[in-house]
Image (cartoon, rainbow, N blue to C red):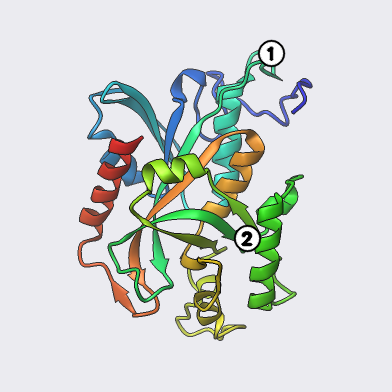
Amino acid sequence: MNREFLPESELVLNPDGSVYHISLREEHVADTVLLVGDQSRVARISRHFDKLDARIQHREFVTHVGTYKGKKITAISTGIGTDNIDIVLNELHAAANIDLKARRLKENLRQLNLIRIGTSGSLQDDIPAGGFIASQFGLGLDGLIYYYNYQFTEEETELNKIINKHLQWNSNLSRPYLVKGSNELINKIGHDMYKGVTATATGFYGPQGRSLGLDLSNTSMNETLQSFSHEGYRITNFEMETSALYGLGKLLGHNCCTCCMVLANRAKKEYVNDPQKAIDRLIETVLDRV
């Protein structure tokens, strides 16, 4: 990354010197950052903190900063979708690694551990509602990474070719891309969770094979995703953020991991009985392992 001066139109700051959308400064960004979609989930994390040092909110971006068992942690809500991940990751990186007064990238950059605690829909019969999934890869159906100069690894490129051949994807849609998460974080936090490829959709309804009355362009999409298998890898679940998290996180030099609680088993048409209790179990699991 170059250290060119960043003008006001590109690095937008608030009057207090914080980055524009998330309203954070360097002191608000811990080395461990927990990302959640739902604003209310931030408080469900911070209620476990030993000490709460800061509460910040701007738009849908709620941040709590504190300590858990003596470790500084930042919990932030991203809202839904890869577009919001683009905002949050770029601005977290800016707060941590750009001198906001000089408007230049710092000489010594911090590497953050970015861990998404989310919800998703399982595509596989054997992954029950209420189960936990750690995403080894994000399969981006959103197209975001193509706006950046991302260099796919040989492993990502090869597996992506195999998946795309299986999917026979509609050429009118963004070309799927595959990005890998941090092995170290996934093994540390999700070692006993279901693992696989997480499909990141651009929406909740049609892009995930749901219809409330509208005709879908591909009525067999979910079955095609479900039937993929290659050398132990399969497409385990749908959600809406992981591919962008993994792709942008790697570009920015950070370690990334997604752990999702399964709200619904799409294959068996089942929904979890007590979603809040299940997400609280996942929050407690992740906190104890970070």
* Mark nearer the viewer, 2 or 1: 2
Q: Which residue is mark 2?
A: 142
Locate residue 51: give its quadrant: top left
Image spot of residue 163 (x, y percent): 64, 69
- Tell me the element at label 2: loop
Image spot of residue 117 (x, y percent): 38, 47
Frontmost residue, 288 versus 37: 288
Residue 102: mark = 1
Residue at 54% across, 23% down: 18
Judge the density around disc 2: few (<14), some (14-19), many (≥20) Cα neighbours within 10 Å.
many
Amino acid residing under circle 2: Asp
From the viewer's perspective, is 229 left or right of 281? Answer: right
Amino acid residing under circle 1: Ala
Q: Is residue 81 visible?
A: no
The quadrant of the image that shows the N terminus is top right
The relative height of residue 106 versus residue 92 in the rendered view (above or below) is: above
From the viewer's perspective, is 166 left or right of 28? Answer: right
Image spot of residue 189 (x, y percent): 37, 43
Residue at 56% across, 38% down: 89
Count the marks: how many? 2
Frontmost residue, 66 versus 112: 112
Residue 125: mark = none
The quadrant of the image that shows the C terminus is top left
Judge the density around disc 1: few (<14), some (14-19), many (≥20) Cα neighbours within 10 Å.
few
From the viewer's perspective, is 106 left or right of 55? Answer: right
Residue at 63% across, 60% down: 142
- Tell me the element at label 1: loop
Frontmost residue, 271 versus 133: 133
| Chain-order first, disc 2 or disc 1 | 1
Frontmost residue, 183 versus 28: 183
The relative height of residue 286 versus residue 152 in the rendered view (above or below) is: above
Instruction: Give the Cα separation between the discs numbered 2 and 1.
Output: 34 Å
